[in-house]
């Protein structure tokens, strides 16, 4: 796909404007806002300039060859032109990807929710495996990973667990992980050696720094209770756990890992995040419908991936990707291969839709 010349110029002009304004303003709020835009625009503007330079050089070389003149110079010019022609498609593709419309939440932090599904104790153990996979992956990415709340399973793992992940581009990297993850393996309690299938649901919610959601406290019921499970010094000693119920939507949030004051503040933040995600889903219904034919709708009920232990296999059903390195993926080391393939597929589909438009 050839990036339009006018679009390249717009990006470069805007980058120059932001850079000039950054050097002129003394307003701290404006500096923060401009710095963020500058960081986002810089790689795009640099590639746009490189692409324009290659295009201009190709045009100059072509004109030189067509003018005739010294055959030896023409031969050298043609050799250089052929080299640039080979370089151009990859550069055009790279710039086209950078110019794709961005999900405004891609740069945001994210909230990870994992719930055990069908499969009883085995589902809870698998939910624990997924939690550890994402925790290790976050660590490898240099992100901050923090447990928010957990309901532990009877024999280990989690019935439900929520964590916050903060860092550069967390949501954009993890958003395609939402959905139903299935596991096929022989449980430790299975005496006949039969393979059982269990499932857990993963939800990745964007958590922007400035969520523009106003919560009417008349719509929220707040309960305090004794915290349960592993935790800090307040756990099991005081009514430090907080449960917030948003009556209009039915959303329930429980925080129990810290003091009551901290849990109350964090519960409200999580409630706003969930209300924001609900609003986002409603606004982006059309986007979700179009994605169903690409890499999935992001619907939490959609079966997206199977982890087959006997075959050491992980299969992502949306893009028909199969990797025989299950342990490496669960350890977080090879999860990026799956995530990278999903992002590449999404980018290719969006490029194709622009070309068809």
Image (cartoon, rainbow, N blue to C red):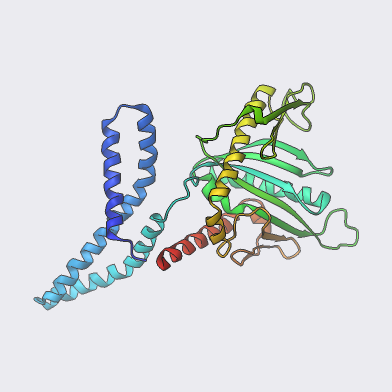
Residue name at image x 64 percent, y 48 percent: 203
Apparent side of residue 211 relative to residue 17 in the rendered image (left or right): right
The residue at 77%/28% (across/down) is 227
Where residue 129 appears, as percent x and y from the top left, is: 72, 49
Q: Quadrant of the C terminus?
A: bottom left
Residue sitting at x 27%, y 72%: 82
Instruction: Estimate the x, y position of residue 120 in percent, counting from the top left.
Output: 83, 50
Looking at the image, which is closer to me, 76 or 202?
202
Residue 189 lies, with reference to residue 70, above or below; the image says above
Q: Is residue 27 left or right of residue 347?
A: left
Q: Nearer the viewer, residue 197 or 139?
A: 197
**Which residue is at the front of the view, 215 or 37?**
215
Residue 249 place in picture, x, y as percent: 66, 40
Quadrant position of the N terminus in the picture: bottom left
Question: Count the marks: how many?
Answer: 0
Left or right: residue 259 compared with residue 348: right
Most distant residue in the right direction: 191
Question: For residue 260, which quarter of the picture?
Answer: top right
| Residue 247 in the image: above or below residue 329 | above
Is residue 26 toward the left or the right of residue 196 in the image? left
Of 48 and 333, nearer the camera is 48
The answer to which image quadrant residue 81 occupies is bottom left
* Rendered location of residue 78, percent (x, y): 21, 74
């Amino acid at each position: 796909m050839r990036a339009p010349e006018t679009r390249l110029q717009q990006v470069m002009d805007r980058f120059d404007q932001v850079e000039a304004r950054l050097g002129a303003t003394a307003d701290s709020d404006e500096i923060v806002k401009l710095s963020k835009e500058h960081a986002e625009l810089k790689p795009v503007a640099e590639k746009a300039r490189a692409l324009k330079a290659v295009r201009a050089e190709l045009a100059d070389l072509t004109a030189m060859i067509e003018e005739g003149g010294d055959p030896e110079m023409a031969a050298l010019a043609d050799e250089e032109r052929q080299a640039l022609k080979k370089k151009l498609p990859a550069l055009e593709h790279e710039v086209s990807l950078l110019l794709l419309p961005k999900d405004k939440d891609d740069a945001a932090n994210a909230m990870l929710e994992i719930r055990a599904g069908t499969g009883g104790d085995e589902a809870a153990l698998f939910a624990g495996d997924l939690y550890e996979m994402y925790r290790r992956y976050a660590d490898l990415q240099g992100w901050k990973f923090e447990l928010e709340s957990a309901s532990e399973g009877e024999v280990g793992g989690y019935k439900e667990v929520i964590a916050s992940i903060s860092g550069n581009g967390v949501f954009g990297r993890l958003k395609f992980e939402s959905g139903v993850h299935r596991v096929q393996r022989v449980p430790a309690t299975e005496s006949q050696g039969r393979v059982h299938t269990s499932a857990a649901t993963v939800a990745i919610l964007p958590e922007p720094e400035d969520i523009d959601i106003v919560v009417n406290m008349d719509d929220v019921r707040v309960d305090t209770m004794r915290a349960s499970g592993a935790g800090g010094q307040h756990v099991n000693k005081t009514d430090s756990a907080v449960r917030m119920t948003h009556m209009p939507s039915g959303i329930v949030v429980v925080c129990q890992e810290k003091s009551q004051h901290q849990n109350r503040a964090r519960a409200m933040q999580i409630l706003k995040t969930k209300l924001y995600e609900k609003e986002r889903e409603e606004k982006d219904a059309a986007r979700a419908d179009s994605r169903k034919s690409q890499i999935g709708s992001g619907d939490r009920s959609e079966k997206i991936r199977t982890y087959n232990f006997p075959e050491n296999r992980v299969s992502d059903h949306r893009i028909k990707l199969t990797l025989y390195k299950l342990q490496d993926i669960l350890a977080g080391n090879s999860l990026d291969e799956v995530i990278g393939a999903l992002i590449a597929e999404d980018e290719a589909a969006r490029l194709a839709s622009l070309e068809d438009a």
